[in-house]
Image: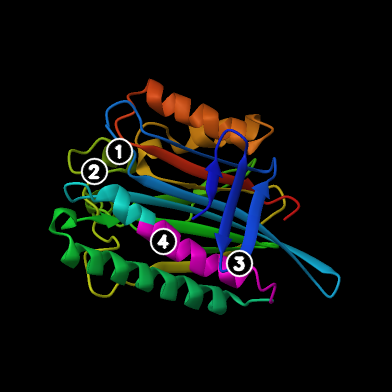
Amino acid sequence: MGNLNRGGRNLEVETQGVRKTVSDRRIGFSTNVGRLRKKDEDSVIVAKVTSVYESVTGNRILLLVADGMGGIEGGEVASRIGASVVGNRILQTLATGDKMESSTYHEVFSQAIQLANKEILHLTLDRTQLSGMGTTVSLAVIDGDLLHIAHVGDSRVYVINQRTIRQVTKDHSYVQSLVDLGRITVEEARCHPKKNIVTKVLGYYGEIQPDLTSLPLDGEDHVLVCCDGLTIHVGDEEIRQIILRNPYPQDACDELVTLANERGGSDNISLALASAKGC
């Protein structure tokens, strides 16, 4: 991919000769190994694509988090493939500047995730030490006043504003199935002994269908994409308060990572945050 410079708030992604650069105080991101893991198996892509065609300027923002798992050394490999393949395919589309309907976004997202899934499966056949690896992929594209989402696994997409925090994806996990059946509460799910069992990921099945949705955004909304390394330690309302009291998303990301680590840092912690204002 490109050059991820967390400290400088810059991300450059180069794909097929088109360069996209993020240097915007309305966008923040961070990834941290946590306190217990030996390596970071997460991958994050954040990109703002500005296009000008026929004197008309358009801005689109991509936020993507992939949380890798499994294999002797495969988690970080799976998340890198998931993020890079999906991210590159989407960025090629965003760079065209064409007006796209929600159905077009969903088709692009689905094709990209299917392609990444096949690449991960193919690699596990060639390298036995990677057998069993997989990755979540959760992504959000802000395009004007619409948010387009694709989701596989137990990473999450949230929309946050002064009134509320809404989780707009549903976890593909064992504990979520228990919540759906009414056997445990959402709070009980956070500390359940089987909370790490994920029921849908890239790299495990020949065909995979992501959850796809689009929804309207208000100018005061914030969009957060994060892995479970954040949400197992920091509650939804705490996330909302931290995001709202920080004037810049990067400061909120830093504070959220610090808090998750202070509470144990039991997993890698990755998140990407953007303000919808001005997009």
Quarter of the image with the C terminus is bottom right
SS category of the residue bearing label 2: loop
- The answer to whether residue 171 is visible is no
SS category of the residue bearing label 3: loop
SS category of the residue bearing label 1: helix
Label whose residue precedes the other's in the sequence (4 or 2): 4
Q: Find disc 4 in the rendering and name its residue.
A: 151
Residue pictured at 58% horizontal, 74% vertical:
102
Q: Find disc 1 in the rendering and name its residue.
A: 190
Label whose residue precedes the other's in the sequence (1 or 3): 3
Q: Find disc 3 in the rendering and name its residue.
A: 17
Q: Nearer the viewer, mark 3 or mark 4?
A: 3
Residue pictured at 70% horizontal, 63% vertical:
144
Which three-letter amino acid code belongs to the residue tagged 3?
A: Gly
Q: Find disc 2 in the rendering and name its residue.
A: 195
Q: Nearer the viewer, mark 4 or mark 1?
A: 4
Q: Nearer the viewer, mark 3 or mark 2?
A: 3
Q: Residue furthest front?
A: 17
- Depth check: give the residue in front, 183 or 56: 56
Give the residues in magenta: 81-98
Label whose residue precedes the other's in the sequence (4 or 1): 4
